[in-house]
Amino acid sequence: MRAKLVAGNWKMHGGLSDNAKLLADVVAGSSGLTRAQQAVCVPFPYLGQASDLLDGTRIAWGAQNLSEHAKGAYTGEVSASMLREFGCTYVIVGHSERRALYGEDSDTVAAKYKAALDAGLRPILCVGETLAQREAGETERVVDEQLGAVTKRFGVGVLGGGVIAYEPVWAIGTGKTATPEQAQAVHAHIRRQIGSADAGVAKNVQILYGGSVKAANAGELFEMPDIDGGLIGGASLIAAEFVSICRAAD
């Protein structure tokens, strides 16, 4: 049976004192959890702080992006090996904001996914459609293209080393959420597509839902058979809310 995973994505939020309080409250609030996996993906400058404060707890930490290059003259970039030095377990790749705001195409995302794997990280591969694409009936085509950029280049087996996050772009930070049934339909499609190539990978890969998940709707979403947890944005910045979501997964 697949474990549930709840991963917080802080995006470009945080400060040393605020982070310390938030993480202390999350650690305290999570003390009774035993089954759900937990993680926070923090801005690069705070990886050292996350490492110090979360070491020895059941909460993993990670980054929100990385370079596809191992090293070199890439000013401003951060490599997978650098993230490993800070004890990262996870790194988000292909978030819709990176695709839309910074022009990352699916080939670049695939290269980042493989760079993360090669360094011993667990990449969280984000896929999802815009509102226009959903209304045009293109959800499955878009998701297949984004996944296919990874599997056609590196083989479906690499998905076994990472996590997939379905994040409908129209539900990120908008307050809109896919219904549990809408989300389940896409998650089931993703698992079927992977299963057509490798049933073992499809059975075991965690597929998270990301898109305005909060304590009020987490339980219904996580009850769906192919939803294995959540990639949490704004709610991960509120300790009580994030812990409640983790409890729903647990």
Image (cartoon, rainbow, N blue to C red):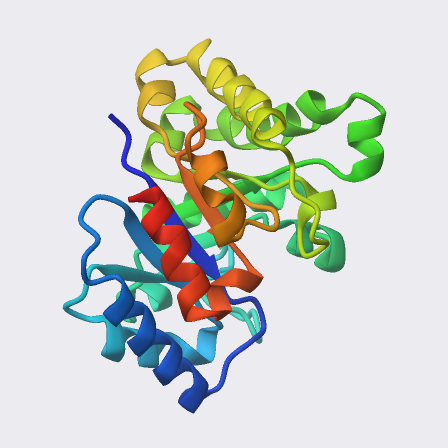
Residue that protrudes farthest toward the bottom in the picture: 17
Q: Nearer the viewer, residue 227 or 144?
A: 227
Which residue is at a point 33% across and 37% down the rendered structure image?
161
Q: Nearer the viewer, residue 74 or 198?
A: 198
Name the side, left or right, on which 59 lies relative to 138.
left
Name the side, left or right, on which 138 lies relative to 151.
right
Number of on-image labels:
0
Residue 156 position (above or below residue 80)? above
Residue 34 position (above or below residue 82)? above
**Quadrant the C terminus occupies:** top left
Name the side, left or right, on which 14 lies relative to 250.
right
Which residue is at a point 69% across and 53% down the rendered structure image?
175
Q: Is residue 200 visible?
A: yes
Name the side, left or right, on which 180 lies relative to 99.
left
Residue 88 position (above or below residue 207)? below
Residue that protrudes farthest toward the front in the picture: 216
Residue 237 position (above or below residue 117)? below
Q: How far across and down, in percent of the image, does residue 98 sit?
A: 65, 56
